[in-house]
Structures are given as C-alpha cells and as structure tokens.
Image: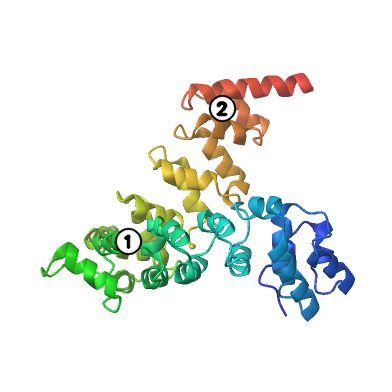
C-alpha cells in the first residue's frame, strides 16, 4: 500500500522507520512511538505507518496515535507545518476528543475536506469554531452543507452562518436553512445573482495556466465581469481561475476574496513574490505569506519580506539573519526601507565582522 505522505517528509535519518522496504521491526518501533522524534515528526510517521502493507503495523500505529501524550498532541496538532492529510487522520482518530479537535480546526493547514467531516458530526463547540472561518464556509460548499445539516449546531449559530452565506451570494435551494435565510434577508424580492465562477472561466478561457495572456481590452472586460460577481462566486473563481483571474482577485477590496486568492492552490511562486514586493499589499496577505514555511524557503521571497515596509520589524529582523552579506550591506544603506530595518542591518554586519 502506498502512503499518501512520502517517506521524504521525514529527515533522512528517520526514514528507515517508515520506509515500506525497511525491516518490519524498525517500522514497528516507530508505530509504537519508540523512536526519538519531534512531535510533528511523530504524528507524520504514524500517519505514514497507518497505510503500511502489514496489518499489525497499521493497527499498532493507529492505537499509538490514540494514546499519544498531551505534550506531543498539543504541540503537533497546532503546528501549521504538519501535513493536511496527517491532520485529517488525527481528526478521525481523535473524533471524540474536542480538546484536540479544536487545535485541528484552528490549524490553517487542515483541509476543507477535514473541516467538512468534522462539521457533519462535531459537537456544538467544534461546529461553532468551524463557523467562524467565513472563507472556508464560502470556499467549500460541502462544508456549508455539513455544518447547517448538523443537528448539534446551535440555532443562533446556524442562523448567523446561513444569513452570512446568503448575503455573500451562496444559493443552495436544497438546503432548508439557506432557503429560510434567503427569505429572512431578502424577503420575496428576486435577487440578482450575477455571473458564476464557472461561467467567467468558460467565457475567458481561464481554466488553463498556459494560455496566452489576455489582450488589454479583454482584461478590462474580465475585470468588469468580476465586479458583477457576488462574493461567493469570486472566492470560487480564486480556485478555478488562472493567473489572469487571480491578478484581479488579489487586489479585491473584499478581504475574504483577497485572502481566497492568496490561498489559491494554483498560486505560483512568482505571484507570491509580487505580492511580497507590493508596498500596498493587505496586511493579511503579507502575514499569510511570511507565515508559510514552504514559501519562505525562497531566498528572493525572504529578501522581499525584509524590504517591505509593511512587514512588522520583528518579522523582518528574523528573516534578515538568513540573508547574504551583500544584501544586508545594501539594506544598511537603503533609504527606501524602514529605519529600523536599516539599523538592524548595520548591527548584523557589525556582529558578523566581530565574529570574523
């Protein structure tokens, strides 16, 4: 059986304990959590071993996952560097333990599918936490359906979610709570829906990333069509559309839409770098960028973060430590960066010179 998380997700010295080609006793050691690992590595290893070809390795890994001590689970499940699949696995394993499910719900790396599964059967507390993530609710229809279909959801919370969803353009005639909310919010007045995300994708051929860039006239026409879309459909367009669509949506005045664009799974490193270099980019987008471990592996992105005056000084200082000396020297003389950054660059140079 092939594990959905590759063995390469673990450091080289630990891979032998999860590699299907390794001797079974080595894999069983990890399945029993007897191998020294960091909390995030332990949960990742158990997830990999839960897909082992040997049934007793799978059973041992699942049993261990259910009995991990609080010091491991509390740390690992809050770590946004943990794989989405691993979080989904522990959401299933710990389905009756709300104290740990809360960590998963609040972890930005958890998938929408995991949230939908928790929303379908979660306790009132878990459902209320899920309901507070408005972007997820509008981005993933199965989540909205599951949440409003859960009898454990408090009536007041359900009404609030449904009202927000219909005001944002959600229209699911088969969901009674949304039908009631639509009547409550708009009365019997017909609501102008505007174009859907799929209609705009088809109209402007936005489904493929490799198509030729739109001519200026078509780009303006696309922008006008996007303006007529409701919030819910613009969020869907952020996932369905290509770079042309995302370029418009990244600048959307609605915070949820702009965040949907920066969180699009199709976003490229070049697009992220442009946002990081943008001195007028929304704070939420910048925060999402510099908190993303995969993106900040890029040297050019770290340099852009340090140079952007909207980045908090402590964050800029943290990334400055990884910059090359020529770039730090340039920062120390750069009049276009905040004074605190230039000053820290001079201090960094001084410390490096003293060490040498």
Q: Nearer the viewer, residue 7 or 241?
A: 7
- Residue 253's place in the image compared with 165, above or below, is above
Residue behind mark 2: 331
Kindly identify the residue that appears in the image at 47 percent across and 64 percent down.
123
Q: Residue 233: which numbered mark, if any?
A: none
Q: Position of residue 100 (x, y in %)?
A: 59, 57
Report whether residue 347 is seen: yes
The image quarter in which residue 227 lies? bottom left
Give the foreground label among 2 and 1. 1
Q: Is residue 25 left or right of residue 317?
A: right
Mark 2 surroundings within 10 Å by alpha-carbon count, few (fewer than 14), some (14 through 19), many (20 or more): many
Q: Nearer the viewer, residue 297 or 178?
A: 178
Residue behind mark 1: 161
The quarter of the image holding the C terminus is top right
Q: Is residue 56 left or right of residue 124?
A: right
Local SS, label 2: helix
- Residue 322's place in the image compared with 167, above or below, is above
Q: Position of residue 342 (x, y in %)?
A: 55, 23
Q: Position of residue 236 (x, y in %)?
A: 36, 66
Q: Nearer the viewer, residue 337 or 253?
A: 253
Q: Position of residue 179 (x, y in %)?
A: 23, 72
Kindly identify the residue that appears in the image at 75 percent across and 75 percent down.
59
């Amino acid at each position: 059986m092939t594990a959905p998380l590759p063995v390469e997700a673990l450091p080289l010295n630990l891979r032998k304990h999860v590699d299907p080609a390794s001797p079974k006793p080595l894999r069983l050691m990890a399945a029993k959590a007897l191998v020294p690992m960091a909390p995030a590595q332990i949960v990742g290893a158990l997830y990999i071993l839960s897909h082992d070809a040997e049934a007793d390795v799978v059973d041992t890994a699942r049993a261990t996952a259910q009995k991990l001590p609080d010091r491991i689970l509390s740390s690992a499940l809050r770590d946004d560097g943990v794989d989405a699949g691993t979080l989904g696995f522990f959401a299933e394993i710990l389905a009756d333990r709300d104290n740990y499910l809360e960590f998963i719900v609040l972890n930005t790396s958890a998938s929408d599918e995991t949230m939908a599964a928790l929303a379908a059967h979660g306790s009132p507390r878990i459902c209320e936490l899920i309901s507070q993530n408005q972007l997820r609710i509008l981005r993933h229809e199965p989540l909205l359906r599951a949440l409003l279909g859960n009898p454990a959801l408090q009536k007041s919370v359900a009404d609030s979610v449904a009202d927000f969803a219909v005001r944002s353009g959600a229209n699911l005639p088969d969901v009674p709570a949304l039908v009631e909310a639509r009547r409550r919010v708009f009365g019997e007045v017909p609501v102008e829906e505007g174009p859907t995300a799929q209609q705009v994708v088809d109209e402007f051929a936005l489904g493929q990333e490799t198509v030729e860039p739109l001519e200026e006239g078509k780009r303006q026409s696309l922008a006008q069509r996007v303006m007529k879309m409701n919030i819910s459909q613009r969020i869907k367009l952020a996932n369905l559309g290509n770079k042309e669509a995302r370029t418009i949506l990244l600048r959307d005045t609605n915070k949820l839409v702009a965040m949907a664009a920066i969180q699009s799974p199709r976003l490229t490193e070049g697009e992220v770098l442009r946002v990081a270099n943008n001195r007028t980019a929304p704070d939420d987008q910048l925060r999402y960028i510099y908190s993303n471990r995969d993106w900040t592996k890029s040297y050019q992105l770290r340099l852009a973060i340090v140079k952007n005056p909207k980045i908090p000084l402590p964050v800029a200082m943290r990334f400055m430590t990884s910059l090359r000396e020529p770039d730090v020297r340039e920062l120390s003389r750069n009049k276009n960066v905040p004074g605190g950054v230039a000053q820290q660059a001079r201090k960094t140079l001084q410390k490096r010179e003293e060490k040498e």
